[in-house]
Image (cartoon, rainbow, N blue to C red):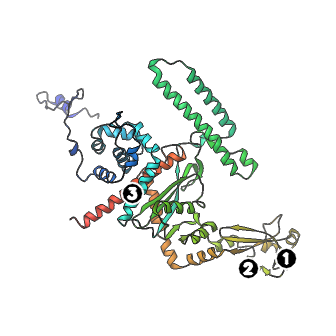
């Protein structure tokens, strides 16, 4: 039975009983009095953020303001306000400048910060991406404050990379021919817009359209430059011809995701001090892997903090000969996961192992169980080892009675054996990682490094970069990590207050 409402049912059942209810009038306007200080509690997060941000040196931000009291001009929004708005928004998982503008109209925390004013989303968006240098210095300044309070000491640092997707789809990746065609159309459209006569009423819209077309043209020109970089990394001619880049975010690269599959992304490297989980460095890169990121990260930390970490903990993606030897040279204790070499050697249990081949030191060759010789083929250096390869003749293996036990899957090649020789630094590193002490220290990597990646994505909303381009993505990552560190600072302050209320 359809619910027709309590009042109507009463009318239908008993005409003499008519309940009296207050009428809701939504077709009205009303003035209201607001006590701004009473909008939020005394210990509200917005107040704490305003206080902490105000305690930092923001002079670089203020120096960039062109209008002055002497010369006049349009008053600018306070940098302390813009920083506080972004930090407060990020703590709520808000990364959109438009959403911050909307929140300024009704959310008590935002209304208290702005004093009931509404900050335009263009102002917020431009501030986030245009103040990258200032944000970097502010990030370093906060680290200095945290170090002075004992929250950072660089005794142990973890480094981990996480792939963060960009505002571009896989369909935006094109070959050179398509990019050239799109660029030609964009240039033609920009020229047409410049030549069009525009009326007074449509000037603003026309300028916005022209600006959008110019930005698209610039992205396509950048895409062709990035295409050349991608081609240089390809070894095969066929791969170079098939190289593609995105027309909407040319600097992005297709990267393998942790959950499986591939997507346009940037590789974000995050270094974390293990005392209180403070992020001491963040860098956004185009690299698909982590091998080349360890040494540059150490240089950045040294530049920020004035010294190198005593110990760095990484996963297997960072462990290479260059990194191990580089850390040994800098006297930084490196802890990292190693691949299971024994497991690699036993992938095929049906074939003879390398230990069943005898090495002839005088002739520099191997002798197989059937008495055939394996001659030296060449060497290769990889991951801290020098690999020497020895190979038998095809004829010897094809007619061998032990072929089914030695190399049953070899159809066109003879059996090969590899002898390896490691550098002194790699030998010491492997010996160290076999110790129980090193393994125990390594276990902190997951809870510390991977937790940071999870936090900035799930709590601060950085599942996807909300800006385009490598430089702007770096700016967004800096603000997110600055917010993370400010949150950690607030957490420690609350703990101290709880332990000692006085």
Residue designated by label 3: 142
Label 3 to label 2: alpha-carbon separation:
57 Å
Label 1: few (<14), some or many (≥20) within 10 Å? many
Question: Residue at the left extreme?
Answer: 16
Q: Quadrant of the N terminus?
A: top left
Residue designated by label 2: 355
Q: Quadrant of the C terminus?
A: bottom left
Q: Where is residue 64 in the image (x, y as percent from the top left)?
A: 41, 42
Residue pictured at 47% horizontal, 57% vertical: 453
Residue designated by label 1: 373
Mark closest to the chain's N terminus, 1 or 3: 3
Residue pictured at 49% horizontal, 28% vertical: 208
Label 2 to label 1: alpha-carbon separation:
15 Å
Label 3: few (<14), some or many (≥20) within 10 Å? many
Label 1 to label 3: alpha-carbon separation:
65 Å
**As rendered, which of 456 and 321 lies closer to the eye?**
321
Residue pictured at 52% horizontal, 31% vertical: 211
Answer left or right for 384 relative to 469.
right
């Amino acid at each position: 039975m359809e619910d027709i409402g309590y009042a109507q049912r009463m009318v239908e059942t008993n005409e003499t009983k008519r309940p009296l209810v207050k009428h809701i009038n939504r077709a009205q306007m009303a003035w209201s009095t607001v006590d701004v200080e009473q909008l939020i509690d005394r210990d509200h997060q917005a107040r704490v953020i305003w206080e902490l941000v105000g305690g930092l040196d923001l002079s670089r931000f203020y120096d960039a303001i062109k209008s002055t009291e002497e010369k006049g001009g349009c008053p600018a929004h306070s940098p302390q306000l813009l920083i506080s708005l972004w930090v407060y928004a990020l703590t709520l998982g808000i990364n959109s400048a438009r959403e911050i503008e909307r929140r300024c109209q009704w959310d008590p925390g935002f209304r208290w910060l702005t004093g009931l004013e509404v900050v335009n989303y263009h102002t917020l968006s431009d501030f986030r991406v245009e103040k990258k240098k200032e944000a970097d210095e502010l990030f370093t300044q906060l680290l200095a404050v945290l170090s002075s309070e004992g929250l950072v000491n660089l005794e142990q640092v973890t480094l981990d990379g996480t792939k963060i997707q960009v505002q571009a789809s896989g369909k935006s990746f094109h070959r050179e021919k398509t990019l050239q065609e799109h660029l030609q159309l964009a240039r033609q459209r920009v020229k047409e817009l410049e030549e069009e006569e525009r009326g007074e009423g449509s000037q603003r819209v026309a300028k916005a359209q022209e600006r959008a077309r110019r930005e698209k043209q610039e992205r396509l020109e950048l895409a062709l430059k990035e295409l050349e970089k991608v081609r240089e990394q390809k070894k095969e001619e066929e791969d170079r011809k098939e190289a593609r880049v995105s027309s909407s975010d040319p600097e992005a690269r297709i990267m393998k995701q942790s959950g499986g599959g591939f997507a346009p992304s940037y590789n974000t490297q995050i270094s974390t001090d293990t005392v209180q989980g403070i992020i001491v460095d963040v860098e956004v890169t185009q690299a698909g892997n982590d091998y080349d990121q360890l040494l540059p990260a150490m240089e950045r930390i040294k530049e920020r903090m004035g010294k190198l970490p005593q110990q760095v903990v990484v996963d297997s993606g960072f462990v290479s000969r260059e990194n191990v030897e580089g850390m040994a040279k800098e006297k930084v204790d490196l802890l990292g996961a190693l691949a299971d070499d024994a497991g690699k050697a036993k992938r095929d249990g049906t074939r003879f192992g390398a230990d069943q081949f005898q090495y002839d030191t005088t002739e520099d060759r191997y002798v197989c169980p059937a008495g055939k010789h394996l001659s030296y083929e060449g060497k290769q250096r990889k991951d801290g080892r020098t690999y020497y390869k020895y190979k038998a003749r095809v004829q010897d293996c094809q007619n061998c009675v032990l072929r089914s036990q030695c190399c049953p899957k070899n159809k066109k090649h003879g059996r090969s054996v590899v002898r390896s020789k490691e550098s002194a630094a790699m030998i010491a590193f492997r010996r160290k990682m076999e110790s129980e002490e090193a393994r125990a220290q390594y276990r902190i990597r997951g809870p510390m490094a991977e937790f940071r990646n999870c936090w900035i994505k799930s709590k601060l909303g950085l599942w996807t970069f909300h800006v385009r381009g490598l430089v702007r993505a770096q700016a967004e990552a800096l603000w997110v990590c600055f917010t993370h560190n400010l949150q950690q600072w607030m957490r420690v302050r609350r703990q101290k207050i709880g332990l000692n209320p006085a």
